[in-house]
Image (cartoon, rainbow, N blue to C red):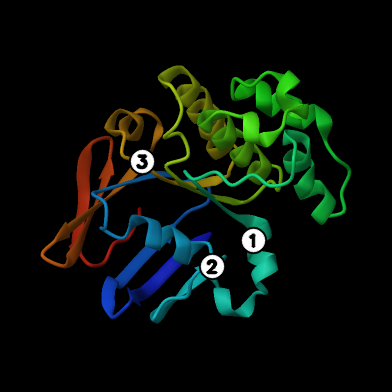
């Protein structure tokens, strides 16, 4: 069973076709980097996979059931989408980290929160800080921890370490890699080629060539499949 599948999806905005007839199959525990130039459709693809936008054609599937058969709230509990532009609300870090537990009416797991903050290189003393006082890198990490608190089955990450220094970025990478090893599925957009080759099992390379998207799938730096406007992950 594939945990996530796109079947012949297309998307357009303002009369411009962004993606055309894209197909992909993602297995549970896959750790996949998505690379390519700006405007090649990477972020659009993740937004489609997170059910934030709908395709103009085709269908997406979660555990072999069409997205359209799920309530949006159902999918957002199991598919988490994080962007580089970390959005924090309220006044304090604590409010953000407790929010997932409050909306799900579950006990706030303070030990997990503090353990994950430490894994991300964040001192627990910032938990009561005002979010406006945080650096860009701190905001990115707090936003990601907030999303991880839902314990999603699929993590969709869009440049989530872009504001971090190398050491902090590697700490986040290591934690996400451990999640993938325990069965969480990860699709991660990155412009960092070293990051792409450092932790990922597979790589999608979006190339925008004259209006057509060419996607190359790599495993261990060897091209295993190259298909114009369609790709399958093995």
- Left or right for 30, reference 65: left
Question: From the viewer's perspective, is residue 104 above or below residue 117?
Answer: below
Q: Label for residue 76?
A: 1
- The local crowd at label 3, few if under 14, some if 14 to 19, many if 20 or more residues have their Cα within 10 Å, is many
Mark 3 / mark 2, whichever is N-terminal? 2
The reply to whether the C-beta atoms of the residues labelled 2 and 1 are less than 8 Å apart is yes
* Residue drawn at x 26%, y 76% as measured from the top left: 16
Mark 1 / mark 3, whichever is N-terminal? 1
* Residue drawn at x 34%, y 43% as measured from the top left: 202
- Left or right for 156, reference 91: left
User: Which residue position is annotated with label 3?
Assistant: 190
The reply to whether the C-beta atoms of the residues labelled 3 and 2 are less than 8 Å apart is no
CA gap between label 1 and label 3 equals 22 Å
- The local crowd at label 2, few if under 14, some if 14 to 19, many if 20 or more residues have their Cα within 10 Å, is some
Give the total number of marks visible in the rendering. 3
* Residue drawn at x 59%, y 20% as measured from the top left: 121
The x, y position of residue 32, in whole percent, is 40, 45
User: Which residue position is annotated with label 2?
Assistant: 51
**Is disc 1 placed on a helix, strand or loop?**
helix
């Amino acid at each position: 069973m594939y945990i996530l599948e796109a079947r012949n999806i297309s998307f357009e905005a303002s009369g411009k076709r962004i993606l055309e007839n894209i197909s992909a199959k993602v297995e549970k525990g896959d750790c996949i980097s998505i690379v390519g130039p700006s405007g090649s459709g990477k972020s659009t693809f993740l937004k489609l996979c997170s059910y934030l936008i709908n395709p103009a054609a085709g269908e997406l599937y979660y555990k072999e059931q069409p997205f359209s058969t799920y309530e949006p709230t159902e999918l957002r509990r199991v598919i988490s989408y994080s962007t580089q532009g970390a959005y924090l609300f309220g006044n304090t870090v604590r409010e953000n980290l407790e929010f997932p537990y409050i909306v799900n009416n579950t006990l706030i797991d303070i030990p997990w929160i503090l353990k994950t903050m430490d894994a991300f290189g964040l001192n627990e003393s910032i938990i009561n800080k005002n979010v406006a006082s945080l650096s860009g890198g701190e905001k990115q990490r707090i936003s990601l921890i907030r999303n991880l608190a839902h314990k999603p089955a699929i993590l969709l990450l869009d440049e989530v370490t872009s504001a971090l220094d190398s050491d902090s970025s590697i700490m986040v990478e290591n934690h996400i890699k451990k999640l993938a090893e325990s069965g969480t599925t990860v699709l991660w957009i990155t412009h960092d080629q070293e990051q792409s080759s450092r932790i990922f099992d597979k790589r999608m390379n979006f190339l925008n060539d004259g209006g057509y998207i060419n996607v190359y799938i790599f495993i261990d730096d060897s091209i295993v499949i190259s298909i114009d406007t369609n790709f399958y992950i093995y």
